[in-house]
């Protein structure tokens, strides 16, 4: 069964850090580009950061540059999103997504991704 399972969400104070994990099963994550998306209350889902299959292509939205880092561990078939200096506006449900690629590239569009995790709630509040 092809699936992505996220973990690591929670409540954190402004300025704090969280690391989200996304474990893939049923497929080899190293053959896929990975995207992390966020859906804030009342807003559309948006791409936060994505990474190509060989990690040479990374795209991040301006609001998280310098604060969020995407990475992967192919040995454990896991992707990560390290989030530092969190702000209240980072609150939302975070989704990881994957799509098989033939080249080192990732899309910022949700429609490009075929496999999605269930989402992890991140709340930044004092």
Image: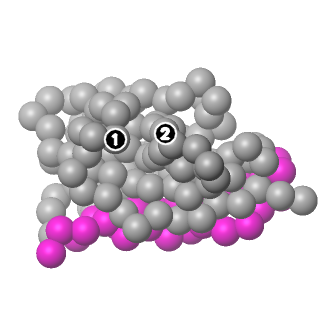
The spot of residue 53 in percent (x, y) is 23, 39
Instruction: Report the residue that reaches farthest toward the bottom.
Output: 1
Residue at image location 53% in from the left, 48% down from the top: 38
Work out which quarter of the rendered image holds the C terminus and state it. Answer: bottom right
Name the disc covering residue 110, or none: 1
Q: Is residue 30 visible?
A: no
Alpha carbons under labels 1 and 2: distance apart: 8 Å
> Viewed as shown, does residue 83 lie left or right of 77?
right
> Viewed as shown, does residue 63 lie left or right of 79?
right
> Viewed as shown, does residue 15 lie left or right of 9?
right
State the residue in front, 62 or 75.
Answer: 62
Hey, which quadrant is residue 9 in on the image? bottom right
> Viewed as shown, does residue 37 lie left or right of 43?
left
The spot of residue 65 in percent (x, y) is 60, 29
- Would you say the residues marked 1 and 2 are in contact, meaning their CB atoms lie under 8 Å apart? no
Question: Is residue 40 located in the magenta-colored stretch of the structure?
Answer: no
Residue at image location 44% in from the left, 47% down from the top: 36
Residue 27 sits above or below residue 30 on the image: below
The spot of residue 72 in percent (x, y) is 37, 51
Name the disc covering residue 76, or none: none
Q: Can residue 90 be seen in this view?
A: yes
Residue at image location 27% in from the left, 40% down from the top: 111
Provide the major secondary structure of the magenta segment.
Answer: strand
Residue located beneath label 2 in the image: 46
Mark 1 lies on a secondary structure that is helix
Hey, which quadrant is residue 118 in on the image? bottom left
Within 10 angstroms of label 1, few (less than 14), some, or many (20 or more) residues? Answer: some
Q: What stretch is highlighted in magenta?
A: 1-25
Residue 113 sits above or below residue 3 on the image: above
């Amino acid at each position: 069964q092809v699936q992505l399972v996220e973990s690591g969400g929670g409540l954190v104070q402004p300025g704090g850090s969280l690391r989200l994990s996304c474990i893939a099963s049923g497929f080899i994550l190293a053959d896929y580009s990975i995207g992390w998306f966020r859906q804030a209350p009342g807003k559309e889902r948006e791409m936060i950061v994505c990474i190509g299959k060989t990690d040479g292509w990374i795209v991040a939205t301006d609001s998280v540059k310098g604060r969020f880092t995407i990475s992967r561990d192919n040995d454990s078939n896991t992707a990560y999103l390290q989030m530092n200096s969190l702000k209240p506006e980072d609150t939302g449900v975070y989704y990881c997504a994957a799509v098989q690629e033939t080249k080192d590239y990732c899309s910022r569009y949700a429609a490009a991704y075929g496999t999605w995790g269930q989402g992890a709630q991140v709340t930044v509040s004092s």
